[in-house]
């Protein structure tokens, strides 16, 4: 009986020792961090890259540096021969990325900086922007938005270096979108933009003067048909060219009185030539005037001419007004 008990005890001890060995081997091979198993530093040379760092099972694992034949250099963590964990990739032209990697692709939080200095900070997935990110440009402008598989989606907030702020849709390749631009001087524009300038049909409110314009813009300037409402309630409807009224227009005051006119830009103090006699809109003829010389004394001023504050030639209700450019730049006086 004692002998049999002794044999069973020996077997139990042997079994426990064997199981303990299995557990220890399992811990060593599976659960311990790879960097512990890859303590040795080795150099591996391939036809496309050279690696110096920790190695496991003959492949880069742990911390190391991989230099590629095209000039790229990756320095950081590896797993099973691929960039995995935290690391920095620098290209031959000076652009670089630092942040998280997975299977040799940008994956997780990171920062990408181009050769020209454009900085993108956000979340990457499988090598592409995917999620919230912020882009800072070399000229001081920056914008924030959301990306899906590398494509900007939804609305952005675009802050200019001069503190203007645009909110709306945005396409980085053309700097185009539709939204609201709030300028540092408190002017507000609502409508489309192209190349970061006002483009197309929109509304612009001037904070300083209280004017409100609705109409068309080209390259940031009023171009085409539009209506401007002044702070005193007067309204001017007409056409603009390069930011100034040009062609036919109608000025209407609060009482509803309207003055039709023909407007075009002229240089200050230059003699203005007028056309041959032509029939007005009502059929009446305009007296032939070859030129208008500068008038030195102002006897009576048509207030509708002064209100616009532009250098203009005007024909009100089919009758030419004598024109004198004032000494103050950007204004003109229409005399009866």
Image (cartoon, rainbow, N blue to C red):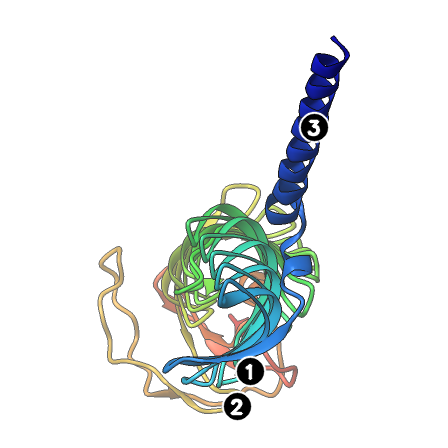
Q: Distance between the residues labelled 2 and 1?
A: 6 Å
- 310 sits left or right of 76 in the view: left
Rendered residue at 60%/72% (across/down): 64
Q: Name which of mark 1 and mark 3 comes first in the sequence.
A: 3
Where does the image place residue 240, in percent across and percent down from the top left? 40, 65
What element does badge 1 sit on? strand
Q: Which mark is residue 266?
A: none
Q: Is residue 147 above or below residue 50?
A: above
Asked if disc 2 and disc 1 are in contact, CB closer than 8 Å, the reply is: yes
Q: In this view, does 322 lie above or below 250?
A: below
Dot 3 corresponds to which residue? 16
What element does badge 3 sit on? helix
Dot 2 corresponds to which residue? 269
Where does the image place residue 103, in percent across and percent down from the top left? 47, 56
- 298 sits left or right of 49 in the view: right
Rendered residue at 46%/85% (across/down): 71
Q: Which mark is residue 325?
A: 1
Q: Name which of mark 3 and mark 2 comes first in the sequence.
A: 3
Q: Distance between the residues labelled 1 and 3?
A: 110 Å
Tell me the crowding category of disc 2: few under 14, some 14 to 19, or many 20 or more residues within 10 angstroms, Cα based.
Answer: some
Tell me the crowding category of disc 3: few under 14, some 14 to 19, or many 20 or more residues within 10 angstroms, Cα based.
Answer: few
Is 11 or 150 nearer to us in this picture?
11
Q: Answer yes or no: is residue 307 visible.
A: yes
Quadrant location of the N terminus? top right
Where does the image place residue 296, in percent across and percent down from the top left? 60, 88
What element does badge 2 sit on? loop
């Amino acid at each position: 009986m004692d002998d049999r008990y002794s044999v069973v005890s020996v077997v139990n001890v042997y079994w426990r020792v064997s199981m303990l060995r299995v557990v220890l081997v399992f811990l060593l091979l599976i659960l311990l961090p790879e960097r512990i198993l890859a303590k040795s530093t080795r150099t591996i040379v391939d036809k496309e890259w050279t690696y110096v760092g920790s190695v496991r099972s003959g492949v880069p694992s742990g911390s190391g540096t991989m230099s590629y034949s095209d000039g790229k250099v990756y320095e950081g963590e590896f797993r099973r021969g691929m960039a995995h964990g935290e690391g920095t990739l620098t290209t031959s032209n000076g652009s670089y990325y630092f942040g998280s990697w997975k299977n040799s692709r940008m994956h997780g939080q990171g920062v990408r900086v181009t050769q020209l200095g454009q900085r993108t900070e956000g979340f990457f997935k499988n090598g592409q922007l995917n999620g919230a990110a912020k882009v800072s440009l070399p000229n001081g402008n920056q914008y924030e938005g959301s990306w899906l598989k590398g494509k900007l989606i939804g609305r952005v907030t675009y802050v200019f270096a001069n503190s203007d702020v645009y909110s709306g849709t945005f396409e980085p390749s053309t700097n185009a979108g539709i939204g609201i631009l709030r300028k540092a001087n408190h002017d507000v524009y609502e409508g489309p933009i192209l190349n970061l300038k006002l483009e197309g049909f929109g509304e612009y409110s001037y904070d300083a003067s209280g004017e409100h314009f609705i109409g068309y813009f080209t390259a940031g300037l009023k171009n085409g048909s539009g209506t401007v409402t002044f702070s005193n309630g007067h309204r001017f409807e007409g056409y603009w060219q390069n930011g100034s009224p040009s062609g036919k227009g109608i000025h209407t005051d609060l009482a509803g009185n309207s003055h039709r006119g023909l407007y075009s830009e002229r240089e200050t103090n230059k003699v203005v030539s007028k056309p041959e006699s032509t029939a007005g809109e009502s059929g009446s003829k305009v007296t032939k005037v070859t030129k208008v010389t500068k008038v030195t004394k102002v006897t009576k001023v048509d207030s509708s001419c002064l209100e616009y504050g532009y250098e203009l030639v005007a024909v009100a209700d089919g009758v030419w007004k004598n024109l004198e450019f004032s000494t103050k730049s950007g204004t003109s006086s229409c005399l009866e």
